Image: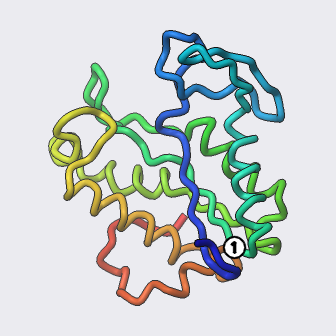
Amino acid sequence: MLRPRDIVVIEFGHNDGASLIPTDIGRGDCPGGGDETCITTFDNVTEIVYTYPAYYANATQLFRSKGATVILSPPTPSNPYNNTEGVFIYSPSNYTRYAAAVAADLGGPARGVAFIDHGQYVANIYKPLGKAVVDGYFPKDHTHTSRIGATVVSQAFVKALVCASSSTTALKNYVINSTESIPGKCI
């Protein structure tokens, strides 16, 4: 149960890239960066589908209305070495830009809505590790990590929290472990 002063982290995006074609997986968003809507049918049910930023904003506003602080975090990257050249390729997705924009549009940290770039922190850790190590974090596909890979991703989240300015997120006050051993620099 959500209570005032709780902290909610929202990280959407890995399953939002599907289409709205009825034979697709039924997890697509309406294209766009605003409040556009689309009508789709999935499993013989007609639905109104919103944009990714609209879902982010709606969830954030719901949690804020209950007194929670909200941290918006873009999705973590899939394996950035999983390409035909086997080289590191990462650039923030539209989901990153949308999450940052929603946080700013809803008032930012002063209004209890923070943004941390979890995806960039993960990418910053992955790059120097190299293809062989990072490929080992993704034993089954390019999206889902192993337990060790998940540990690296969670460490990147903690690094992002600790590196955030003091006004950005209340959750950093709960980090009790030293983060010096977590690779990467503050951005």
Which image quadrant for residue 93?
A: top right
Residue 152 sits above or below residue 20 on the image? below
Q: Secondary structure at mark 1?
A: loop
x 69%, y 24%: residue: 47
Q: Nearer the viewer, residue 88 or 138?
A: 138
Which quadrant does the N terminus fall into? bottom right
x 76%, y 67%: residue: 64
Q: Position of residue 9 (x, y in %)?
A: 56, 63
Which quadrant does the C terminus fall into? bottom right
Residue 36 sits above or below residue 130 on the image? above
x 37%, y 80%: residue: 179
Q: Is residue 14 left or right of residue 28?
A: left
Q: How many marks?
A: 1
Q: Is residue 40 left or right of residue 34?
A: left
x 81%, y 35%: residue: 34
- How did the renderer colour the structure? rainbow
Note whether residue 62 is visible.
Answer: yes
Q: Position of residue 53 (x, y in %)?
A: 72, 41
Q: Position of residue 148 (x, y in %)?
A: 20, 58
Question: The disc labelled 1 sits on which kind of residue?
Answer: Ala
Note whether residue 165 is visible.
Answer: no
The residue under label 1 is 68
Extreme front residue here?
44
Residue 80 sits above or below residue 174 on the image? above
Residue 107 sits above or below residue 176 on the image? above
Q: Is residue 134 left or right of residue 69?
A: left
Q: Position of residue 89 (x, y in %)?
A: 40, 34
Q: Is residue 89 left or right of residue 168?
A: left
Q: Nearer the viewer, residue 57 or 136?
A: 57
Q: Label 1 crowding class (10 Å Cα cut-off): few <14, some 14-19, many 20+?
A: many
